[in-house]
Image (tube, grey):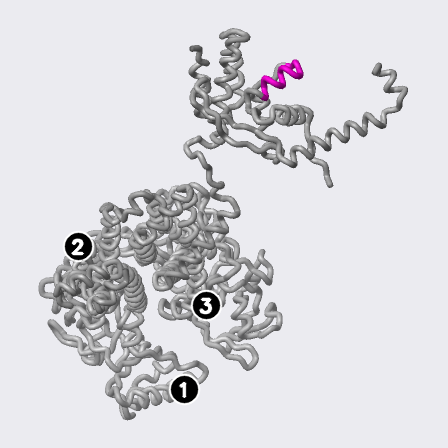
């Protein structure tokens, strides 16, 4: 089967959604990524990536959890779908295979 | 509490993706709070705005709908439009039938007329130089006898070419009466359409030689150029070049060129062309009066076409030519030249006033009216039935259809119907064409490969489609679901009155057409039955040729034959007199005055033969002195201002004579013309046309005897005769055809109107079924129900009549002005037209009304 293509940032976002589990929505995802990776990401970038992932079928969403600080607007909570999980696993597997086939001396040279 | 910049919020509201707007706004607010706490308000504002700007989707649709529907030209939607449209057509078979049949007939007839119009307008325009070719004509005569001659003198063409730089080239044509019988081997054919012409005919016009030497079409005086068809008639498939045709048995002509047959839309038509130089050689052979082709300014018999330089002032050229003419013949002071553009020749009269263009315009208007009526039918029926469809439209809207989609849906529905109607119409068109050609006397050919035909067909169909599809589509897609579902659409008055307006227009057009038909046919009847001033019944005539030398013997012989009642002779065709002359004088003629008069040479039997009434004086007696006696008609006496004409001196050409009689005015031309001055002079030996009055019953025998006598003296020539009644009818042939076509087209227009009215009436009855049921249960009579239903329509028709009558009056007075002798328009003609329209409408409506009124109320009320 053809592997689903997952960009680097898409992978990060998808993983973050998986990490956050029930509480994954725009704000938490943005903050989580900033915290974990230490790089500053724009909300708009995260938002469009989420949209794209939803379109690809890796994410599903539901509305809910309106709070006062949001002006009474609801949040869109994201969860990783089965396809999404498979895509993540695929990527992971590829990485591991690649790491695994690295010659030992090169690995040593890299200092690990 | 801090809030992000207002403009950024607004921007987000208007331009962000409607699908995700809610959470994006919420998320950004939350983040903004976070940013304010961590990095300060200024930078939070900055970040917020930047995120907003990045999220804008300026080209996306506005966010009015929260659930966007698919794009209205999405393939799935298009498929859906067609499916719905087809279902609708099939479901409402009755209305589909009415619509399609109305449109089919309307389109077929409309296109047919427009094709004819196109054909008429294309006359003489196919020459590459047609815009710079003009026909030279001249005015002659003074006062009431002033008129235009389209054939002019021979030398002017040469002078024009030599002396006026504006004239590049000239072509002259004159009818050939000298050689009529042509023979090749055992084939002998009598030719009628042959001309003497200049060789420039084949270069100025697009009548190029396809065989022969274009540089020298006539190598010598015995050359002849023929058309392809003519060549085929004589030589079959043999090469015609170099073949010798024997004319009138003694002159031999060698075919030196072949041209293509003349296109049907050419005003110049002919079969054979002989060199003009031969004609001059023949007529100036004896050098009589020292006249030759360069100085004879008195023979007006040459159709002259001039090829001009671009941007020539036609008026100043005409003046120059007049100066040339007067220099050569100073006494022609009444003559002025004028030029008519070649493309105008077919549709305009010689003086530039409207001729055939009037008919073309009239029929174009009828075509547009017929198409308009067909469109109105469609619009009326589909908007009337919109009530029934309002629920469908509302449901579609509630389920999520956008207005644009509904609009397209109805457009597709109309287009589908039109496609069916158009296909049928084109079929009908080809089927109708032979009948049309027969009726109109035209030879309209639909050449499928001619793009111009498809232009007309395409434009007509697209035009009518646009006219009849847009309004219903706009209306039907505009229903507001809530109101429509509550059943409140019928309360919309404006569109009902729009419909009424259209019905009024339709019937106004019908009344105008009925009145027009009526008046045209009355006028035609009038000119055919008007007292002509002479009796032409049972008379036939022919040109005697060699018989005329033996006239007395022939006459004596024929008078003894059965069926022959009387015989006379003249030099002209009395039904349509030809030659006019201004070479005359009388006591009291003013300086510079020229009276053009028709001159007829007759013998002493002529006036009694035709039962003409002598108003004063006496007839010719046959005495020698008669050669200096003249009989004038009343118009001539009036034009010459003679009080006591009998015995007065009168000069005609070189004959100084006296007036011995005045004949009552008689019609010797079409009723479109006024009776003009004419003169009879006594010259039996020059009267080559014999008139034979038959007893009517034994006409066949009389013709047979005449033929036998003809064979005796003109053995080689075919015997061609014609009855004066036929000649007379031919004068009005085009009017008769116009009248007949007008009648037919009007009937079609009325028929289509009725079809629409029928549909509307059926619809009204259908909508009011239950109302009628209730009324009947409560005791309404059948008549009162019929009245109820018919009243609305009758009102409309009455309004239409009121509008139509003045219009028809005005239009028909205009048409009648073309006739010198015409009927008066009377009020009862319009009354009859109005009543007829009313009766037709009533008949159409009452069928449905009666059906509805007779319906059993139990049935209609149960259907809830």
Q: Where is residue B249 in the image (x, y as percent from the top left)?
A: 50, 78
Residue in the image at 31% along x and 43% along y: B482
Dot 3, how many residues are within 10 Å of its Cα: few (below 14), some (14-19), or many (20+)?
A: many
Q: Distance between the residues labelled 3 and 1?
A: 24 Å
Q: Residues within 10 Å of mark 2 (few under 14, many from 20)?
A: some
Q: Residue B737: which disc?
A: none
Highlighted range, magenta:
A29-39
Q: Position of residue A86 (x, y in %)?
A: 69, 35
Could you say which disc has been placed on residue B711 in the image? 1
Q: Nearer the viewer, mark 3 or mark 1?
A: 3
Mark 3 or mark 2: whose residue is earlier in sequence: 3
Q: Residue B799 carries which label?
A: 2
**Residue in the foreground of this view, choosing between B340 and B92:** B92
Q: In which quarter of the image is residue B252?
A: bottom right
Residue placed furthest toward the left = B644
Circle 3 — which element? Answer: strand
Give A78 or B756, whichever is nearer the viewer.
A78
Q: Is residue B358 on the magenta stretch?
A: no
């Amino acid at each position: 089967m053809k592997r689903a293509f997952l960009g680097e940032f898409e992978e990060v976002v998808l993983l973050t959604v998986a990490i956050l589990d029930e509480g994954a929505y725009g704000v938490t995802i943005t903050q989580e990524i900033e915290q974990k990776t230490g790089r500053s990401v724009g909300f708009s970038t995260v938002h469009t990536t989420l949209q794209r992932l939803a379109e690809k079928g890796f994410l599903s969403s539901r509305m809910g959890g309106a709070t006062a600080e949001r002006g009474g607007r609801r949040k869109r909570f994201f969860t990783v779908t089965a396809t999404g999980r498979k895509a993540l696993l695929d990527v992971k597997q590829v990485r591991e295979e690649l790491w695994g086939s690295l010659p030992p001396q090169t690995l040593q040279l890299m200092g690990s | 509490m801090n809030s992000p910049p207002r403009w950024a919020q607004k921007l987000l509201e208007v331009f962000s993706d409607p699908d995700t707007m809610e959470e994006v706004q919420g998320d950004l607010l939350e983040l903004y709070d976070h940013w304010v706490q961590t990095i300060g308000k200024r930078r939070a504002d900055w970040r917020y705005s930047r995120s907003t700007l990045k999220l804008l989707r300026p080209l996306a649709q506005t966010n009015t709908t929260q659930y966007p529907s698919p794009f209205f030209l999405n393939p799935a939607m298009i498929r859906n439009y067609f499916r719905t449209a087809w279902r609708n057509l099939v479901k409402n078979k009755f209305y589909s039938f009415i619509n399609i049949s109305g449109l089919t007939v309307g389109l077929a007839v409309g296109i047919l007329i427009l094709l004819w119009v196109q054909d008429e307008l294309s006359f003489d325009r196919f020459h590459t130089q047609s815009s710079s070719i003009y026909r030279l004509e001249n005015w002659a005569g003074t006062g009431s006898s002033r008129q235009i001659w389209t054939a002019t003198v021979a030398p002017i063409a040469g002078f024009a070419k030599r002396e006026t730089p504006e004239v590049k080239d000239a072509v002259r044509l004159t009818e050939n009466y000298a050689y009529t019988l042509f023979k090749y081997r055992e084939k002998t054919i009598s030719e009628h359409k042959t001309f003497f012409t200049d060789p420039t005919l084949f270069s100025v016009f697009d009548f190029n030689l396809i065989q022969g030497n274009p540089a020298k079409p006539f190598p010598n005086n015995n050359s002849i150029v023929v058309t392809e068809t003519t060549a085929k008639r004589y030589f079959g498939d043999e090469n015609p070049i170099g073949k010798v045709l024997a004319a009138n048995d003694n002159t031999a002509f060698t075919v030196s060129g072949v041209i293509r047959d003349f296109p049907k839309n050419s005003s110049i038509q002919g079969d054979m062309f002989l060199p003009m130089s031969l004609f001059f050689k023949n007529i100036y052979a004896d050098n009589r009066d020292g006249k030759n082709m360069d100085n004879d300014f008195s023979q007006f018999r040459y159709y002259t076409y001039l090829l001009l330089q671009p941007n020539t002032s036609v008026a100043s050229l005409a003046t120059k030519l007049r100066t040339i003419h007067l220099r050569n013949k100073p006494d022609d002071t009444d003559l002025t030249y004028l030029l008519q553009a070649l493309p105008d020749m077919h549709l305009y009269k010689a003086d530039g006033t409207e001729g055939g263009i009037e008919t073309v315009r009239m029929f174009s208007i009828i075509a547009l009216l017929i198409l308009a009526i067909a469109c109105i039918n469609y619009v009326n029926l589909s908007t009337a039935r919109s009530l029934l469809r309002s629920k469908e439209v509302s449901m579609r809207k509630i389920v999520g259809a956008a207005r644009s989609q509904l609009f397209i849906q109805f457009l597709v529905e109309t287009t589908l119907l039109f496609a069916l109607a158009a296909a049928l119409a084109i079929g009908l068109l080809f089927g109708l064409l032979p009948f049309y050609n027969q009726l109109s006397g035209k030879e309209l050919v639909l050449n499928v490969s001619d793009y111009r035909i498809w232009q007309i067909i395409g434009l007509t169909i697209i035009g009518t489609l646009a006219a009849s599809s847009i309004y219903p589509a706009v209306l039907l897609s505009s229903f507001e679901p809530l109101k429509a579902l509550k059943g409140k659409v019928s309360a919309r008055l404006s569109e009902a009155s729009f419909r009424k307006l259209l019905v009024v227009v339709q019937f106004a057009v019908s009344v105008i057409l009925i009145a027009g038909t009526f008046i045209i046919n009355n006028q035609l009847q009038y000119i055919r039955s008007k007292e002509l001033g002479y009796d032409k019944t049972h008379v036939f005539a022919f040109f005697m040729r060699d018989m005329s030398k033996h006239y007395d013997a022939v006459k004596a012989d024929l008078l003894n034959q059965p069926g022959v009642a009387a015989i006379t002779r003249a030099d002209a065709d009395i039904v349509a007199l030809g030659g006019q002359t201004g070479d005359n004088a009388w006591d009291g003629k003013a300086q510079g005055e020229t009276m053009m008069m028709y001159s007829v040479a007759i013998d002493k039997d002529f006036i009694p033969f035709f039962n003409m009434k002598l108003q004063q004086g006496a007839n010719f007696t046959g005495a020698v002195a008669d050669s200096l006696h003249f009989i004038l008609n009343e118009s001539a006496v009036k034009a010459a201002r003679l009080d006591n004409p009998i015995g007065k001196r009168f000069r005609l050409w070189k004959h100084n004579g006296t007036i011995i009689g005045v004949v009552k005015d008689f019609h010797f031309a079409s009723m479109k013309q006024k009776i003009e001055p004419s003169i009879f002079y006594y010259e039996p030996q020059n009267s080559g046309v014999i008139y034979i009055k038959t007893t009517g019953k034994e006409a066949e025998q009389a013709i047979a005897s005449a033929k036998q006598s003809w064979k005796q003296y003109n053995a080689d020539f075919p015997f061609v005769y014609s009855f004066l009644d036929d000649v007379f009818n031919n004068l009005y042939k085009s009017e008769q055809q116009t009248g007949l076509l007008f009648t037919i087209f009007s009937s079609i227009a009325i028929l289509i109107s009725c079809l629409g009215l029928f549909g509307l009436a059926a619809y009204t009855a259908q909508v009011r079924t239950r109302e009628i049921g209730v009324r009947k249960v409560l005791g309404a009579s059948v008549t009162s129900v019929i009245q109820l239903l018919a009243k609305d329509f009758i009102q409309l028709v009455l309004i239409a009549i009121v509008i139509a009558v003045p219009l028809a009056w005005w239009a028909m007075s205009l048409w009648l002005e073309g006739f010198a002798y015409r009927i008066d328009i009377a009020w009862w003609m319009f009354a009859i037209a109005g009543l007829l329209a009313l009766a037709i409408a009533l008949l159409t409506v009452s069928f449905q009304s009666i059906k509805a009124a007779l319906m059993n109320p139990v049935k209609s009320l149960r259907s809830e």
